[in-house]
Each structure stands twice: as C-alpha cells, then as structure tokens.
Image (spheres, rainbow, N blue to C red):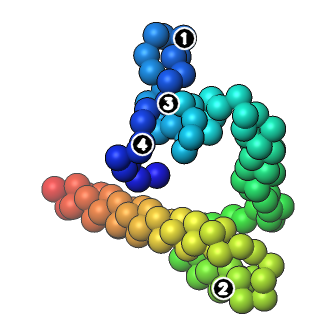
Amino acid sequence: MRKNKNSKQCSFIKPNGKLCGAWAMENSEFCFTHNPETKDLRKEAVIKGGKGNKKETHSLDLIRVENSKDVVDLIVKTVNELRTGLIDVRVANCTFYGSGQLIKALETSDLEKRLEEIEKILEEKK
C-alpha cells in the first residue's frame, strides 16, 4: 500500500505497548488485521491462505548413486518424468541441483582415491 496524504498508521497498540506499524484502511483507524469490521473477511482470508499454501508431497522411489552413470540415469529419468508431467518443475530443479552436487562429490572422491594410490606408490619407491 502506498502512503498518501490521507494515510495514517493503524491505531492498534500491541502487547509490548508499541503501535502496529501497518497503514490504516481507508475510512478506518485500523489496518485490515486489527479492524473489528473486517473480522469475518480476515477469517476467510486466513482459511483461504492456509488452503492455498499447502505443498504437495511426492512419493518418489529412493535411489542409490554410486557412480557418475547413476547420476546420468537419474537426470534422464527426471527429464522424462518432468516432460510427461509426473513430477513438478520444483522437484526436478532440486533433483538437477542435487545431481550436480553428487557429480562434484564423486569427482572429488575419485581424485582422492587416485592421489592415495600415487602416494602409496611413491612411498613404496623410497
């Protein structure tokens, strides 16, 4: 809401003794939340908001990722499920992001193993 010359602050005083801080509704000394005349509308808005914000849960199969091929398979499966509408785009985005993290972790793990092998060979040559 934009402040204009007719705007004023809500007159409701909170339990801590401070003013509400929101702008009062037109022709009222209170904001929508504290206006006694909007009690029923406020209740409807709370109910409507609660129903509208529920997140869908998805029962997806657990997967086992042990190598980069498993990650590629997961990405391909996710693309197909997304294209056919079986999963939400937000689930797909999270899966793609997680897949990128898995690839990085697998690469790091592989490099650590290779480094350990090289160090072992160098120790044996001493």
Residue 55 coordinates in the image, percent (x, y)? 74, 55
Instruction: Label 3, secondary structure: give it.
Output: loop
For mark 3, what is the residue?
A: 10
For mark 2, what is the residue?
A: 79
Mark 3 or mark 2, which is nearer to you?
A: 3
Q: Residues within 10 Å of mark 1 (few under 14, many from 20)?
A: few
Mark 3 or mark 4, which is nearer to you?
A: 4
Closer to us: 23 or 115: 23
Instruction: Label 2, secondary structure: give it.
Output: helix
Callout 4, which amino acid?
A: Ser
70 over 105 or under it: above or below: below
Q: Specify whether residue 80 is in view.
A: no
For mark 4, what is the residue?
A: 7
Residue 100 coordinates in the image, percent (x, y)? 47, 71
Q: Earlier in the sequence, mark 4 or mark 1?
A: 4
What whole-number distance in Å separates the C-alpha atoms at marks 3 and 4? 9 Å
